Every structure is written in structure tokens, then in C-alpha cells.
Image (cartoon, rainbow, N blue to C red):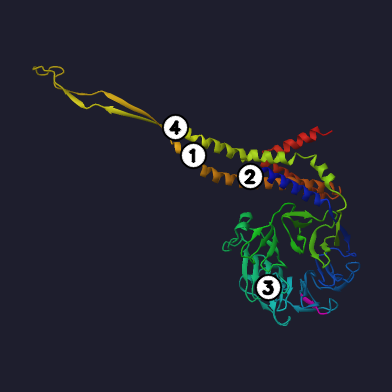
Amino acid sequence: MYKKIISFTAIWSIITAGALFAEGFNWEDVSGGNYGARVLLVNPKESKIVFSACSGGLFKSENSGKSWRRVLSVKGGSNRVNALAFSPSNLNLVYAATDKGLYRSKDSGERWEVIFRGKNSKENSCSAVLSTSRAISVGTKAGLFISGDNGRSWNKQRGDLNNIEIFNIDAKPGQDKIIYLAASSGIFRSSNSGESWERVYVRFSHKNENEPVIDNEEARDEDSSAEAHFVKADLNNISCVYFSGTRGVYKSLDQGKTWGKVGEYGLLDRDVKMLCLWNGQGILGLTRRGIFLLQDERWKELSFDLSAGELNYLVLDNKGHIYVAAEKGIFKAVPVNFARVSASPLVQEYLKREPEIRQVQQAAIKYAEVNPEKISQWRHLAAKKALLPKLNIGLARNSTDLWHWESGSSAIGQCGDDLLRRGKDSLDWDVTLSWDLGELIWNADQTSIDSRSKLMVELRDDILDEVNKLYFERLRVRAELDNLPIEDRSKRFDKELKLEELTASLDSFTGGYYSEQSRLIIRDRP
């Protein structure tokens, strides 16, 4: 059974590694001369209509980015557009959250009006917006404001949401009673369209000792100061919600009551800015320098050929095309399938320069002392235990009583007359041998061995699973590094650093065996 588990895991990992070389993305620059893009919005029904917030205002394209025209200029001081949103009931209604208030267009971006301004600069700086069938919510640097009358009046939310910075707001379309928002103090959920809020993930603040710690065990184990950047409700599961932050991606299957950490294999940077749910494909995560797709519990980078500087925003259209707002403009990717090219020879070529996976597994098992033969040896020795007797040795001191000696002399003071003398000591000892012949049939130690065997099998499986992931992850990173252009120094540094990290992890599991074998292979190669 043990050998079958190893073989299946190795075969599956090789298949997954080969799939990496069979997929690709063609990135196209659709900036049209607009640089410093911060936010994007694609019409969910008409994918040709795209809005982009760049330096200088808001731009609109009606041909999937082939040409752009300015539709909104925010005047005075900071003129950034920080967030965009459609009305779910009317896609001609577009909202733009800016540093100078909330703007709305009723004709798909042609004319704009201000529908919200705060009392001070922080309230005026709008960072997030959400439109539902019941209300309009706008997040600012000083709290959350909600309007239930189409923007004519606004109510500031009190309590935990008072005067904190809001990062983003999200709700599942058609299920807008449940709303989530990411803020500087954690993740909040409303189950009644924003009438009341509950904090479901708490960020610990070192500046305020009265601030409660994270109430989620897995998150607390990672880092109690993890900041949540972005929250995303699952489109297909009302109970499922994700958030990304400085320590990676977390997932909840009970509307935020409990959180679990999503795996990090393949993720070069744990500081994930935002997430997109790609139906039928997986989860897209955006970091400063890369775009990653989570599939089969590992992240695959999709931005190899993308040289765009710092990445700011990510969005999908209804055809599965990816748009990215970046420092150097706006870029669009169309997935390309190269399945007609066989990847097996390429994978095998990389495997030739690595220690065999089975040898690495065996080294990890030996180093952790979880070899299956260990349990077999215990059982064999326990079966022989009944043949050995129990040996008991007894030892005691026996002292005789005191006795009186009469010398028989009548002379007073005669030596030895009427003396009380002490008897001599003696030592008693015994040896006993005993056998419990019933143990030849059943030994009670077998129960303890069965429990230890179960724990050892679980530990061995965990170690092998970790080693397999690290081994093939390192293989993928090597391939990615080989395909990077020499001039892309920033990405090359990240990949090389990741390669060293994976090597160190493999060495920690194998007691340095991996690096030692790698050096021998390099030395022996012609």
C-alpha cells in the first residue's frame, strides 16, 4: 500500500508538471497611450465596453481596448479614481469612487454627477463602492456610508465601522442581503443589506492594546497582524467567501465564521492585492509583480511574458479574457492551449538534472525515522517478549537478637561478668523467574503498537506529500526561470530566491541529502 501511494503521487505530480508547459497566455498591450492604470471595469454583458481609471481621469473603450477616450476628469488636487462599479439592475448606471467624492453616470459614462461628498478630506476620499438592488454603499478613509434612496441622502455607519478605512465591498449578485467589506481593522459581514454589521475577521493592532486578537485559529497561527486587503464572495456558493492580505489568501465555507489558509505552493509573493473568481478555472490572485492561478492546490504564474511594472488591478470579461491595470498601462490576455505539443520530453529533460523523486522520498523517510519496517520490527520483538522470563531478585538483612552472657565469676568487677552482647548479622537473598505464557497468544503491547503505527503512517504520508510538492514545485520554478528574459531582473531575482527557498525546504526534510545529490549530478554531467 505504501509503495502504491508513492507511485501514484509521483505520477500525478509529473502529469501536473507537464501541464504547465502545455498552457500559455498571449498578453496584448491595449493601453492606447494611457499609463498608470489603477482600476478597470468591464461590462458583464457587453465585453467590448471597458472603463479604465488612469492618471488624468477615467477613460472608456467600446472596442475591447483598441481605442480609448476620456469621459471623466476629477478636478483639484488629487484626482484619482479608486473604484468603479455597475448597477446590477441597470448597466448604464456606472459609479466612480474618487478622492473628491462619489460620481455617477446614468448613460454608460457619457455624463457624470457628484452624488456624495464627505464633511472632510478623509470622508471625501472614496475608496470602494457597491450598488445593489436595495442600496448604494460607499467606503471612505473615514468609514462607510449607505444610501437607500438612490443617493439623495446618506447615513454613516457607526460602531466598529466608524472612522476606519474601507478597502473594498462585495456581495454575490442576486444575494445582496449578505454584504462583505474589507477594512483596516478586519473583515465585516452584513446579513441584512447593511443595516447592521458583524466583524468576522479581526486584525490585531499593536497600537491599541484594547483591540481584540484574531478569533480564527488558523489565521492566528500564521500572523496575528495580517492585514486584509480584499474580500470576495463566491458567485456559486452563498456560504463561501475569500479574502486576501499580507499573509496570503484565506477561505471560509460558513460566511466568515471560521477561516482556513489557502495553500501557497507556487505563490512567489504572499502579499496578494486582490482576487478574481474564474468560473471553471480557479482563483486568480494579483500581487505587485505577478498574476497567479490557483488550481489543484497550487498557484501557477500566468504573467511570464508580461512586462508591465507594478500591477494594480485585475478583472475578467464574460469571455474569460483577463485585463490588468498596471504601472505601464493596460494589458489583455487570451488563454492559449498548446496541447498539440507533447511536454513529456521536456519534463524528462528537467528530471535528468534532479535526484530521483523516489530517492528523495526515501531520504526524507529515513531522516524522520518513519520507515514502515520500524513498526514491523516492533511487532516481531513484542511477539518474542513472552519467551523471556521476568526476573525478581530479593535481598534483606537479618539481625539476631541481643543476648546476655553470664561469666559465672563471683568476684566483683570481673572482666566479662554480666555482659550484654549483640548477635551477628546475616543477609537473606532470593531469585525468582516467572513466565506469562498467555502472551504467546496475545500481547497487550500490540494495542500500543497499533496506535503508534497509525500515527506514524499519517506522519509519513504528510512528509511524503510535502516532499512531493516541494520537489515538483522546484522543477516548475526552474522551468519558469529558464523561460524568463535576461533583462527582466526583478522577476529573475524572485524566481531565483524561490528556488533557493525550495532547495532549503527539501534539505530540511532530507537532512541535506537533496543538495548533496544535486551537486553530484552536476559534477558527473559532461
Mark toward the viewer: 2 or 3:
2
Residue that appears at 24% across and 26% down: 400
Q: CA distance from mark 2 to mark 3?
A: 50 Å
What is the secondary structure assignment of the residue under circle 4? loop
Mark 4 — residue?
A: 389
Sort mark 2 into few (<14), some (14-19) or many (20+) by Cα contacts within 10 Å. Answer: many
Which residues are drawn in magenta?
102-106
Does residue 325 sit above or below 109 in this rendering?
above
Mark toward the viewer: 4 or 3:
4
Marks 2 and 3 in Cβ contact (< 8 Å): no
Kind of residue indicated by mark 2: Arg
Mark 3 — residue?
A: 144
Q: Is residue 105 magenta?
A: yes
Q: CA distance from mark 2 to mark 4?
A: 35 Å
Q: CA distance from mark 1 to mark 2?
A: 30 Å
Residue 460 numbered tag: 2
Indicate which disc, 1 or 2, sits on the residue closer to the N terminus.
Answer: 1
Q: CA distance from mark 4 to mark 3?
A: 79 Å
The outermost residue toward the left is 410
Q: CA distance from mark 1 to mark 4?
A: 16 Å
Residue in the foreground of this view, choosing between 237 and 267: 237
Query: Which quadrant would the N terminus be assigned to in this image?
Result: top right
